[in-house]
């Protein structure tokens, strides 16, 4: 009996405990639902719904002619909420949609896509990534017409999630100059320096967190739309940039050099048309742009003999020398205090004029003149450097500009040998951009302009900010001194260390530079070679500097290494810039024609023969029965001469109508830009030049 009562008591106790727990749960449910409902609903919404950043579209970067250097292209990830589409819409379109997805992505079968989407709909999954591969805008437009997708986001549940990627149409061209910006907002070049304009203002939109940790955009009237970034319009010329990079790359490869840089600038405006920097890759094979040596700290180095222009400026301004004065440079070795200075020529130059000292780049000659004129007052020499503005940064538009280094008289590191060695470009440091700015001022008749690489910041037709040519110094020297410096620079090319770049088509003026590399406090047998100058010398339009560091092989001098690169760049710019060419083939042809004879230049032989025969003009094919020909008048008749348009070089299209010129040139793989009307008067790439695919050729019609 006691056992029975004990069991009943335990059962009743257990029932009572269960009842109490059930009552507590019921009480809690009622409290959560009706008393604390609003509180927990708000928390749930705050956890699952959130305003998130919507990135603005980054602005474009353009070359001077409007060519795109960098742009943001929209790519899309395709996501589907299969619960949105109505049952009849879903059932009617799922088979065809699955087949289209399988054909497009080629990673699953039609049946696999159908099962994936159908299962997601059955399970109430509201965020299904169909494929992680990103698609372009055209593909997105095409997919928008597919079954179910064509009902849009609200009717079909399709979501095209936008992802922007930075794209460079010209690939690696000017890559370091165009630059980059990483996730930590650090970078280089234009992308970094002008990021405040390019990045725009980000917006905000409501997103819902769903299964898998994904955030799905939710339409909300309070969304803040992003403001797209401004476009940056540069001064760069893609054709000149291409020419500069190609010429530099070939010489670096041939000489197995460490790095090289080229800057090409318009003399009058300071607009930089090309800025190339190539450094040997870490694996030792090939070159790429990884640092801007033209303007950066790592580009600061002893300039060598190109600095002798500054020394001559000071000497001429001081009135201490005449270009025809004779100076004894001795046997090629001269003692300054406890150090010996040598000339490049074994045995020395002996007694030569000041003009020859500069043309032959005699270290001893320049140093003796500077030491004699300024040794007692080196501050006077430094004052000319300061007047030219070489001792300060140029405040260039790109961040990371190197600061010039000059010793100062009176300081602990100023020795008796400092001035002689400084006069020939040692014991001081300049960037290539600083050196070019000095030479550009001489080409510009003394006016020093600030180099610029960005012309304007704009959005559509609205210009937010524009940059004009800024004059840094109205004149760095007297008119007489500038004229003498121009003579000296022309003499270097005509008679001196850069005779190998002299040509009869146009004049080049410039100076070679070769500086021994200082490593661990000692000068080595490695060299920093350079050539800086301008062209055409009689009416300067472009200035340029070429620097090649540590070339290997014999004759590692500026005249042998850097000057030929300058010449190649100058030749191609001169050929492409139609305004620099005074006589055109068409002008020559017209001069050969008599005033009363029909004016016929070139075209297809069958068409020209038909026209001439129709009008009774005597003409002779001379065995040419097809293709393009040129004409030559002889004895009151026209002689047709074959125009070899099929040969693997750039053909002569002068005289051809635009239609024929386009046909011939585009079949060669060239991109044609033309201006004017009528027949071709001139072409930017000389006939007979090697054809390079996708190069631009400019045509002038008239």
Image (spheres, rainbow, N blue to C red):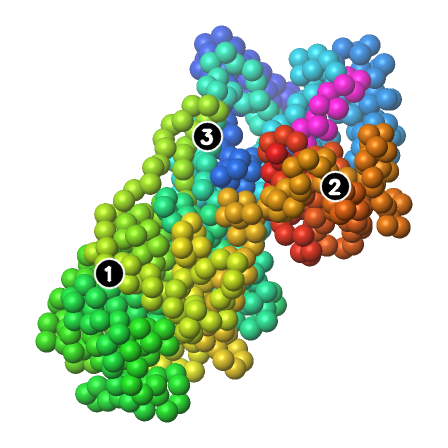
Cα distance between the residues tagged 3 and 2: 50 Å
**Residue 582 coordinates in the image, percent (x, y):** 52, 47
Q: Quadrant of residue 613?
A: top right
Asked if residue 313 lies left or right of residue 560, the reply is left
Q: Quadrant of residue 335?
A: bottom left
Is residue 143 rendered magenta in the image?
yes
Q: Nearer the viewer, mark 2 or mark 1?
A: 2
**Residue 387 coordinates in the image, percent (x, y):** 19, 56
**Residue 10 coordinates in the image, percent (x, y):** 61, 24
Q: Which residue is mark 1?
A: 481
Who comes first in sequence, dot 3 or dot 1? 3
Check disc 1 and report its element: helix, strand or loop.
Answer: helix
Locate the C terminus by quadrant. Answer: top right
Q: 146 above or below 670?
A: above
Most foreground residue, 1 or 596: 596
Most foreground residue, 408 or 64: 64
Rendered residue at 73%/20% (across/down):
144
Who comes first in sequence, dot 2 or dot 1? 1
Rendered residue at 29%/42% (across/down):
470
Range drawn in magenta: 136-148
Q: Which mark is residue 229?
A: 3
Rendered residue at 59%/20% (across/down):
18
Q: Which residue is mark 2?
A: 602
Please rate how many residues cluster around mark 2, counting C-alpha atoms within 10 Å: few if below 14, some from 14 to 19, many from 20: many
Rendered residue at 51%/40% (across/down):
63
Cα distance between the residues tagged 3 and 1: 48 Å
């Amino acid at each position: 009996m006691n056992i029975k009562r004990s069991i009943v008591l335990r059962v009743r106790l257990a029932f009572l405990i269960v009842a109490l727990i059930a009552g507590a749960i019921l009480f809690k449910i009622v409290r959560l639902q009706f008393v604390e409902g609003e509180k927990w609903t708000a928390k749930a919404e705050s956890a699952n719904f959130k305003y998130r950043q919507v990135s603005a579209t980054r602005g474009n970067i353009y070359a001077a002619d409007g060519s795109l250097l960098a742009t943001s292209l929209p790519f899309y990830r395709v996501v589907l909420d299969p619960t949105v589409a109505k049952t009849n819409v879903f059932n009617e379109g799922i088979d065809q949609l699955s087949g289209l997805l399988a054909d497009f992505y080629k990673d699953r079968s039609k049946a696999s896509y159908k099962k994936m989407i159908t299962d997601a709909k059955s399970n109430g999954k509201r965020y299904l990534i169909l494929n992680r591969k990103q698609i372009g805008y055209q593909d997105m437009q095409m997919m928008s017409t597919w079954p179910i997708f064509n009902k849009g986001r609200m009717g079909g549940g399709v979501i095209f999630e936008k992802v922007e990627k930075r794209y460079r149409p010209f690939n690696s061209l000017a890559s370091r100059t165009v630059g980059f910006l990483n996730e930590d907002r650090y970078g280089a070049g234009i992308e970094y320096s002008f990021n405040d304009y390019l990045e725009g203002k980000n917006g905000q939109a409501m997103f819902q967190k769903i299964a898998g940790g994904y955030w799905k955009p939710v339409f909300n009237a309070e969304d803040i739309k992003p403001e797209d970034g401004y476009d940056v319009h540069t001064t760069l010329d893609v054709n000149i940039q291409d020419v500069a990079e190609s010429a530099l790359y070939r010489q670096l490869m041939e000489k197995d050099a460490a790095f090289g840089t080229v800057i090409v600038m318009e003399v009058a405006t300071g607009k930089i048309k090309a800025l190339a920097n190539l450094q040997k890759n870490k694996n030792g094979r090939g070159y790429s742009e990884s640092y801007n040596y033209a303007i950066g700290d790592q580009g600061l180095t002893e300039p060598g003999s190109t600095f002798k222009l500054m020394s001559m400026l000071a000497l001429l301004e001081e009135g201490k020398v005449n270009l025809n004065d004779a100076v004894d440079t001795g046997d090629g070795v001269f003692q300054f205090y406890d150090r010996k200075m040598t000339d490049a020529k074994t045995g020395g130059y002996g007694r030569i004029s000041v003009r020859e000292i500069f043309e032959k780049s005699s270290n001893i000659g320049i140093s003796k003149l500077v030491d004699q004129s300024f040794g007692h007052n080196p501050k006077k020499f430094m004052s000319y450097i300061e007047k030219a503005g070489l001792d300060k940064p140029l405040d260039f538009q790109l961040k990371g500009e190197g600061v010039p280094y000059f010793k100062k008289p009176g300081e602990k590191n100023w020795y008796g040998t400092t001035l002689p060695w400084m006069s020939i470009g040692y014991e001081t440091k300049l960037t290539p951009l600083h050196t070019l700015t000095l030479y550009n001022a001489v080409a510009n008749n003394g006016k020093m302009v600030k180099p610029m690489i960005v012309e304007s910041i704009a959005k559509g037709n609205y210009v937010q900010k524009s940059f004009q040519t800024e004059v840094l110094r109205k004149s760095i020297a007297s008119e007489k001194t500038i004229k003498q410096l121009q003579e000296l620079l022309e003499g270097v090319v005509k008679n001196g260390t850069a005779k190998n770049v002299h040509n009869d088509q146009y004049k080049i003026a410039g100076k070679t530079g070769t500086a021994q590399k200082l490593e661990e406090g000692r000068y080595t047998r490695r060299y920093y070679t350079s050539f800086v100058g301008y062209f055409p010398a009689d009416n300067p339009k472009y200035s340029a500097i070429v620097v090649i560091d540590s070339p290997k092989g014999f004759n590692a001098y500026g005249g042998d290494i850097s000057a030929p690169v300058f010449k190649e760049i100058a030749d191609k710019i001169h050929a492409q810039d139609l305004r620099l060419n005074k006589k055109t083939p068409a002008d020559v042809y017209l001069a050969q024609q008599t005033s009363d004879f029909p004016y016929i230049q070139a075209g297809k032989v069958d068409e020209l023969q038909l026209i001439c025969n129709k009008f009774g003009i005597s003409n002779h094919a001379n065995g040419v029965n097809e293709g393009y020909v040129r004409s030559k008048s002889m004895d009151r008749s026209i002689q047709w001469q074959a125009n070899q348009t099929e040969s693997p070089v750039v053909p002569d299209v002068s005289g051809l109508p635009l239609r024929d010129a386009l046909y011939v040139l585009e079949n060669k793989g060239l991109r044609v830009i033309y201006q004017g009307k009528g027949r071709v008067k001139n072409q930017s790439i000389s006939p007979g030049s090697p054809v390079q695919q996708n190069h631009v050729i400019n045509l002038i019609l008239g």
